[in-house]
């Protein structure tokens, strides 16, 4: 699908291409949310056409010394291809690693504080922390081997999930809740935004991880609501209502969770 969110920005943009696996939100979702929140069009290459995934595989999963257009190799999707932004100013730029892509897009999509000071690094700091939690949640169902089935590592998964739910999730939620309060006390955000007084990719990234945790561990997250009322209440609800995101979240472009990072195995949730 070629995404056409409502256009909010006046600036002209290249036709950005998100290179990711088809059919799952996965780590591609952090990038989609940034585009959708900004109202900037992008091509979700693997979901846009039947042969789209072969392009993703050629660029991001080849065994050569180059990804494409003279760019260095990519370890794995997601990657971003930006036509016209290559070294010679004509070919394409290809970059990878979710937080690196978000950092590149942040200023271009208007999803970081306007001044170039500490605020931009704070946005990146919060997003990186949310992505750390994303990785820890992944390890609850694959604690031993990424390429082995969940069923082959279930015993370890039960132990890992218990630790992540009991010690790691509350530690991360506490950090995000304190970040919200810090911003509010500094006169920004009104409890709606983590950094500054408008939506940044820190908000969209934290929101996606919270939403994924609610899918994966519904009982655990419901039980934590009292402890973290601002984060799991006002903040979570407000991000959903942001223009661009509201339309996206009820559209077909928002893919359902399935067998990606966020999986619902009832036995891994609070009992
Ligand atoms: N740290 C990387 C992780 C990338 C990653 O793990 N990508 C997954 C899909 S979400 C993948 O295809 N991994 C293949 C592999 O690790 O072999 C990022 O944030 O982009």
Image (cartoon, rainbow, N blue to C red):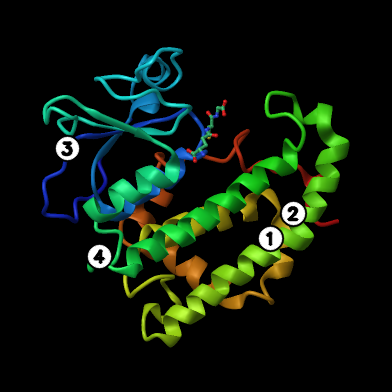
In the rendering, which numbered label is found on residue 14?
3
Q: Which residue occupies the foreground of this view, 210 or 87? A: 87
User: Does 245 appear above or below 235?
Assistant: above
Q: Mark 1 sits on what residue?
A: 169
Give the spatial CA distance, label 1 vs label 4: 31 Å
Asked if the residue at label 4 sits under 8 Å from ligand 1, the reply is no
Q: Are marks 2 and 3 in contact (CB under 8 Å)?
A: no
Q: Are marks 2 and 1 in contact (CB under 8 Å)?
A: yes
Q: Helix, strand or loop at disc 4?
A: loop
Give the spatial CA distance, label 2 vs label 1: 6 Å
Q: Which residue occupies the foreground of this view, 64 or 258? A: 64
Q: Are marks 3 and 1 in contact (CB under 8 Å)?
A: no
Mark found first going from the N terminus, 2 or 1: 2
- Quarter of the image holding residue 37? bottom left
Q: From where the camera sits, is residue 262 visible?
A: yes
Query: Residue at the location (70% across, 69% down)?
Result: 224
Q: At which x and y percent is residue 255?
A: 48, 39
Q: Mark 2 sits on what residue?
A: 164
Q: Helix, strand or loop at disc 2?
A: helix
Q: At which x and y percent is residue 93?
A: 24, 31
- Quarter of the image holding residue 2? top left
User: Does 124 appear above or below 160?
Assistant: below
Left-right relation of 175 to 219 = left
- Image quarter (top left, top right, bottom left or bottom right) of the N terminus: top left
Q: Mark 4 sits on what residue?
A: 116
């Amino acid at each position: 699908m070629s995404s056409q969110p409502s256009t909010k920005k006046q600036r002209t943009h290249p036709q950005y291409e998100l290179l990711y696996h088809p059919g799952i939100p996965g780590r591609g979702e952090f990038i989609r949310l940034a585009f959708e929140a900004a109202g900037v069009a992008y091509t979700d290459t693997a979901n846009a056409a039947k042969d789209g995934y072969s392009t993703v595989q050629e660029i991001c999963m080849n065994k050569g010394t180059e990804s494409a257009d003279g760019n260095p190799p990519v370890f794995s999707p997601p990657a971003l291809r930006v036509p016209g932004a290559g070294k010679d100013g004509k070919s394409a730029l290809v970059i990878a690693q979710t937080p690196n892509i978000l950092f590149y897009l942040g200023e271009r999509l208007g999803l970081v504080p306007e001044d170039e000071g500490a605020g931009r690094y704070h946005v990146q700091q919060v997003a990186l922390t949310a992505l750390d939690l994303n990785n820890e949640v992944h390890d609850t169902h694959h604690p031993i081997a990424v390429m082995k089935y969940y069923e082959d590592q279930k015993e370890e998964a039960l132990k890992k999930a218990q630790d992540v739910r009991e010690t790691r999730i509350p530690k991360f939620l506490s950090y995000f809740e304190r970040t919200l309060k810090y911003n509010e006390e500094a006169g920004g955000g009104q409890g709606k935004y983590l950094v500054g007084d408008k939506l940044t990719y820190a908000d969209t990234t934290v929101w996606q991880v919270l939403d994924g945790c609610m899918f994966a561990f519904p009982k655990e997250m419901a039980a934590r609501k009292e402890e973290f009322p601002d984060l799991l209440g006002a903040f979570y609800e407000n991000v959903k209502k942001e223009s661009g995101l509201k339309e996206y979240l009820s559209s077909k472009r928002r893919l359902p969770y399935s067998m990606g990072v966020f999986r619902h195995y009832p036995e891994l949730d609070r009992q």
